[in-house]
C-alpha cells in the first residue's frame, strides 16, 4: 500500500489546475510557434530521407511539412474544442488534460507529416510516425509539469499583489450612488441602490444577490441579458466575467491564483468565481 502511495504522489500533479490556450489568440500564436520549431528542426536535422534531397526540393518538402504542422495545430486548438466541449471546458482544465492535448497535437503532426514524407518515399508509414510520437511523450510530460509550476507561481504571486491593492483601494461608486437600479421582467420588478447589488448570475432565469437590512437576499427573474447590461451602464463597479457572471467589484473579498488563472471569492455569499483567461486583464485592472 505504501508503495502505491509513493507511486501515486508524483502523479497528483496531473490533477492540478492548468491553463488552456484553446480557442484563443494565444492558441493561434502557439500554433505558429510549434510550426516554426518543427520547420527549423527539419532544416537543421534533416531526418528520414531529407538529407539526400537537393536544396530546392528540400525547401519544398520542409515548408510543406511546416504547413501540415500548422493545420494539425489549428485542428487541435480550435476544431476539437468546438466538437468536444465537455473535455475542453476551461474551468475543468488540468495538467493531465494539458498533457493529453499535447500528445494529441504530437500524434496528429507525426502521422500527417510522416504520411506526407512517405508519399515522397522519404519515410516509412506508420512505423516512423509511431517512433517519432514515442520519442515525444516524455519531453511533453516534462513540459506540461514545468508549465504548471511556472503558471501557478506566476498567478499566485499576482493574486497576492492584487489582494494588497484591493485592501488599499476605496469603494467604487456610480456617478450618482443613490441612483436606483430598476430591473423589470415578465411582471417582476427589483429596485436596488447600486452597491446593494452584490452579484448576478445570468441565464434564462437570472439570479440576483443583494444585501438589505436582514442580510443577503436572492431574487430570480426572467429578464433579457441585454436589459440587465443596459441598466448597469454608468456603474463602473460592475464587471462581467465569463459572459454569464456580473460582480460588484466592491464585494470581492479575495483573489486567488492557480495555473489556470484567477478565482475571485465574493463576500457575504459562498461563491467562488473562476475567471476565464480572456477576463484576466479585468482582474489586473481592478
Image: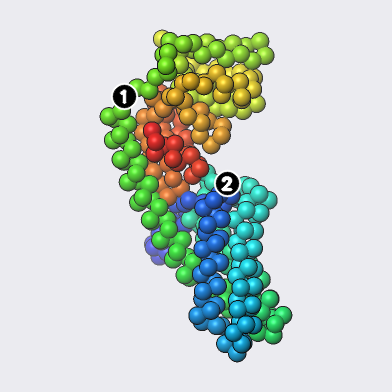
Who's the residue at 57% across and 87% down the image?
Answer: 51
Mark 2 element type: loop
Q: Residue most toward the right?
A: 119
Looking at the rendered structure, which numbered label has been put on residue 19? none
Q: Is residue 153 left or right of residue 77?
A: left
Percent coordinates x, y for residue 258 in the rendering: 41, 47
Q: Nearer the viewer, residue 138 or 171?
A: 171
Q: 10 Å neighbourhood of mark 2: few (<14), some, or many (≥20)?
A: few
| Nearer-the-camera pick, 280 or 103 | 280
**Label 1: which secondary element:** loop
At x 44%, y 40%, the residue is 281
Above or below — where is 242 with respect to 150?
Answer: above
Percent x, y for residue 249?
41, 27
Q: Label 1, on which residue?
A: 170
Please tell me whether residue 248 is drawn above or below residue 52 in the rendered image. Answer: above
| Sooner in the amino-acid sequence: mark 2 or mark 1 | 2
Give whichever of 76, 58 is nearer the camera. 58
Q: Which residue is mark 2?
A: 89
Amino acid at each position: 500500500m505504501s508503495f502505491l502511495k509513493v507511486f501515486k504522489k508524483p502523479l497528483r500533479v496531473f490533477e492540478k489546475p492548468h491553463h488552456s490556450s484553446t480557442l484563443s489568440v494565444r492558441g493561434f500564436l502557439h500554433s505558429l510557434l510549434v510550426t516554426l520549431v518543427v520547420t527549423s528542426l527539419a532544416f537543421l536535422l534533416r531526418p528520414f530521407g531529407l538529407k539526400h534531397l537537393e536544396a530546392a526540393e528540400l525547401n519544398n518538402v520542409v515548408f510543406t511539412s511546416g504547413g501540415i504542422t500548422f493545420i494539425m495545430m489549428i485542428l487541435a486548438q480550435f476544431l476539437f474544442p468546438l466538437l468536444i466541449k465537455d473535455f475542453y471546458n476551461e474551468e475543468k482544465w488540468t495538467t493531465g488534460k494539458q498533457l493529453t492535448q499535447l500528445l494529441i497535437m504530437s500524434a496528429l503532426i507525426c502521422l500527417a507529416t510522416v504520411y506526407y514524407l512517405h508519399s515522397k518515399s522519404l519515410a516509412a508509414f506508420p512505423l516512423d510516425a509511431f517512433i517519432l510520437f514515442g520519442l515525444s511523450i516524455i519531453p511533453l510530460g516534462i513540459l506540461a509539469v514545468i508549465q504548471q509550476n511556472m503558471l501557478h507561481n506566476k498567478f499566485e504571486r499576482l493574486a497576492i499583489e492584487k489582494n494588497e491593492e484591493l485592501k488599499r483601494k476605496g469603494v467604487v461608486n456610480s456617478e450618482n450612488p443613490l441612483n436606483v437600479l430598476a430591473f423589470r421582467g415578465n411582471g417582476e420588478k427589483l429596485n436596488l441602490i447600486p452597491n446593494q447589488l452584490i452579484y448576478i448570475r445570468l441565464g434564462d432565469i437570472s439570479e440576483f444577490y443583494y444585501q438589505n437590512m436582514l442580510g443577503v437576499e436572492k431574487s430570480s427573474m426572467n429578464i433579457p441579458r441585454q436589459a440587465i447590461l443596459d441598466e448597469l451602464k454608468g456603474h463602473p463597479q460592475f464587471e462581467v466575467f465569463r459572459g454569464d457572471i456580473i460582480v460588484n467589484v466592491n464585494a470581492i473579498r479575495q483573489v486567488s491564483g492557480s495555473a489556470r488563472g484567477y478565482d475571485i471569492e465574493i463576500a457575504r455569499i459562498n461563491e467562488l468565481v473562476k475567471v476565464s483567461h480572456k477576463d484576466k486583464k479585468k482582474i489586473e485592472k481592478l
